[in-house]
Image (spheres, rainbow, N blue to C red):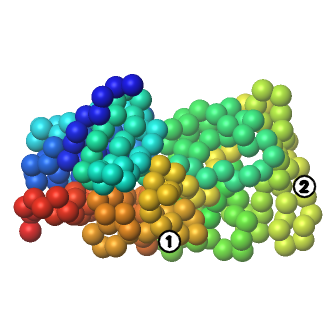
Amino acid sequence: MPELVSKDLVIVGGGPAGLSAAIYARRSLLDAVTLEREALGGQTILTSEIDNYPGVPHTDGFTLSDAMRAQAEELGAHIVMDPVSSIGLDDKTGRFVVEAASARYDAASVILAAGARPRPAGFEGEERFAGHGVSYCATCDGMFYRDKQVFVVGGGNSAAEEALFLARIASKVTLIVRKDHLRAQTALVRELEENEKVELRLLTSIVSVEGDELPGKITLRDNATGATYVERFEEGSVGIFVLVGRIPETELVSGLVKLDGQGYALTDERMATWTPGLFVAGDARAKPLRQIVTAASDGAVAATSAAAYLGLPVEG
C-alpha cells in the first residue's frame, strides 16, 4: 500500500467546479491536488455550443474547459488523472484519507466536485443497447445519425437543447415526453414547436426497444389511455437519446454529508457540509441552477472556504 501523501486540500473532480477550485486554491497558496478520473472538463467537454458563459461567447465545451485547465496549470495547480475510490475521515486525526488508484492522500480538507452522471429512463432494452443505438449524449453520438430518425426521451432543458442540436443532423427528431407538458424554458419550447423537423409527443413513454445488433423495433405507450403501439425501423437507421436527468456523484461522501431526496449534497452558501473541512461544489450539490457558470462559482467559493477553514488568508 502506498504511503500517505499529505495535502492541505484534495479536489475530487476536474470539471468547471474542480478547475475553478484549483485556480482559487492556488491563489490562496494551498498545497492542493485535483484528481479527475476520465477527462478534464467533465460533462462540459461534451457540449458543442456554449453561449451563456459571460465573456466567452460562441464557444464550445472542450475549448472552454481547456482554457480553464491551462489557466489552472499556468498558476501552478497540480492536476492528476487518477480515479478516487473512497473518501474517509480519520477519527483520531480529524483529517481525510482519499484513496485513489495510484496514490493515497492525507488531507486537511476536501472539495467534492465530481458532478453527476446520466439517469437511465428505465425502458426494456435500454441497458442492452446502450452505446449501440441508445445514447445519453447527442453531441457525442449525434453524427452517427446524420439523415436518420432519432427519438429523444425527456422534457427538460437538456432534452430540448439536445433535440434542437439533433434536428440539425437527423432527418427527423421525435421528442418523447411522459407528462402533458415540457419542463424546458419557454424559449426552448418555442424553438422546438417552430422546428419542422421536430415532433413533440406528450404523454408518451418508451416501453421497450428490440432488435438484433441494433434497435429496430420501438414499443411506445400512450400515457393518457395506456394503449401501446409499435414503430419499426431498419436496424441502424434509428437512435434513441435518453435525457431524463442526472444522478449526482455523491456516493464517495454519502456517509459524511446530508443528501436531499435525489441524492444531491446539502451545503450552506460557503459550500460547506456538516462534516468540517468537507465541501461540495458544482452539479453534485443541491441548488436551483446547474450551469457551467454556477459550477465555476461554486468551485471558487469552496476553495476560499477551504482556505478560511485552514486559517489561511483568502481573496475578498
Q: In which quarter of the image is residue 73?
A: top left
> 194 or 280: nearer the eye?
280
Q: With respect to residue 23, does 211 lie above or below?
A: above
Label 1: which residue?
A: 185
- Residue 108, above or below 145: below
Q: Percent from the top left, x then y, of residue 37?
A: 41, 35
Q: Position of residue 188 (x, y in %)?
A: 50, 66
- In this image, 59 relative to 266: left or right? left
User: In percent of the image, x 55 and y 37: which residue is there?
Assistant: 141
Is 195 on the left-hand or right-hand side of 310?
right
Q: Are marks 1 and 2 in contact (CB under 8 Å)?
A: no
Which residue is outermost to the front? Answer: 92
Observer-nearest residue: 275 or 267? Answer: 275
Q: In this view, does 209 lie to the left or right of 25?
A: right
Q: Note whether residue 6 is visible.
A: yes
Q: Residue under circle 2? A: 229
In the image, is residue 180 above or below residue 214? below
Q: Which callout, 1 or 2, points at the residue further toward the start of the chain?
A: 1
Q: Is mark 1 on a helix, strand or loop?
A: loop
Residue for point 54% across, 44% down: 137
The crowding category of the residue bearing disc 1, from other C-alpha atoms within 10 Å (few below 14, some 14 to 19, many at least 20), is few
How far, Cα to Cα, is label 1 from label 2?
30 Å
For badge 2, the amino acid type reads Tyr
